[in-house]
Amino acid sequence: MATIHVPYGVKGKIDFEIPDRNLVLDTDVPFPDEIPNLEQAILNALDHPVAGPPFSERLAKARKVIILQDNFARLTPAYKILPPILRKIREAGKEVEILVASGLLREMNEAELQRKFGEEILKSGIPIIQSVARARWDFEFLGVTSYGTPIHVHRRLLQADLSLAVTMTQATLWGYGGGGSMILPGVSSYETIEWNHRLMTCPTSGVGYEPPLNRLRADIEEALLMSGLDMSLLAICNPQLGVIELTAGETIAAHRASVAKYRNYYAFDLNQIPGGQLDVAISGSFPGDRFFAHACWPIANLDYFVREGGTIIVATPVPGGLAHYSYAKDYMPPTPQALARLYEDVFYGKQELWHACLWMPIIEVMAKKNVIVVTEPERLPDFEIVQVPAVTSMAEAWQIVQERYGADVKVGNFPYGKWIVPAEMPIREFVGRRA
């Protein structure tokens, strides 16, 4: 028997035994520990960028510096990445403030600010401003991208002499996080975010795809260039959120380089699977996945690894409930007619694209594959509302898939499925796609 260790959000982990013959792919591989002397590594990365002038050179010419930091939905450990940067800026006698790239998510509360920034930064007196996308007066119009997206960006970014985005590279439902997404949606207005998010319906505006195939990300990168963001510092973390890679420089080049590093750790070859695809994939969840709107992401990633009619199991306690995923209830089960109604509701403004992007890719997978959620007893009524099968133990989920696929069921273990991508991305067609 093989024992798999399934991360279970804030609850720790679930240890579960699977017969050796059934476990045909295990992505629970060793990761490096955090970079030794992290503070010095951060400063070295900034002064040895992959593109553009070093941070020290830029800083010498600046008076006011702004740092863009990602929001509570991203697990970037700002509390240990920002301190050496902030000290360097203050020692140079420059003004500095932090602008949280909230997108259309709510502002962080005190507990979330504490988790994100830590006591040292919160007590430093450095201003922390949270971008509020619906506060129209905070944004300035810069023009229109080639995709037709009008770009309104936060004025505080535009008023700074030097701007640095600090975030992490990870797979997301829309490609790879970090990079230009710190501008759009990060510090863009509601209108800009909605215009851009219409591109999420392109088949390759999804997990693992980069521009030019990824239209949504290509549009984001045009907005980035229009915004004048000077540079980015991108971290890659191991599953315990230790920083294992750092890349800095002009944002598009830095992001591409960081994605290449990310794939060295989190991309897996489908050819390792007998027959090319699994019957069942099992994923856990991070402690930061407090809402199902974020814990559900492995479903989209593992779509590539699981055959049609197969099953994706996600273990997550989601103490915060469904969040934006609750809107999916009106389109379940996800029949072609239900998905057509979703597109219609988006067109007529009954559903906003910024929150549909958190669950629309998931129900599209559920139209062709089964999903089982392993969760807490008190969460079962939530999943009944959105018609997602849920149980309270891995043993129950395992019994279901054994009955469904038989004794020779092919299983893959993906402890942190929301960060996993295929080693080679399939090319998806842009025309003629049928529901």
Image (cartoon, rainbow, N blue to C red):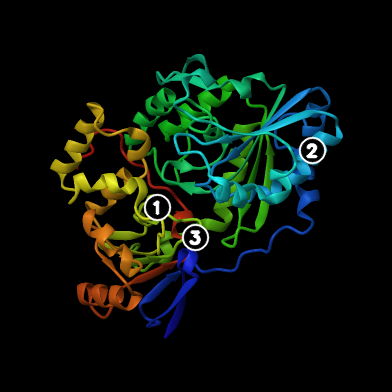
Q: Amino acid at mark 1?
A: Trp
Circle 2: residue type: Asp
- How far apart in space, not on screen, are marks 3 and 2 (Cα)? 32 Å
Q: Pointer 2: what residue?
A: 47
Q: Can residue 102 be seen here?
A: yes
Amino acid tagged 3: Phe
Tell me the element at label 3. Answer: loop
Residue to which mark 3 is pinned: 286
Q: Position of residue 253 (x, y in %)?
A: 62, 34
**In which quadrant of the rendered image does the C terminus lie?**
top left
| Residue displayed at 20% across by 44% down | 330
> Is disc 1 placed on a helix, strand or loop?
loop
Q: Reading the chain from its start, which is encountered first: label 3 or label 1?
A: 3
Q: Which of marks 1 and 2 precedes in the sequence?
A: 2
Q: Is residue 260 left or right of residue 401?
A: right
Q: Which residue is mark 1?
A: 297
Q: Is residue 158 left or right of residue 21?
A: right
Q: Residue at x 33, y 62 (%)?
A: 277
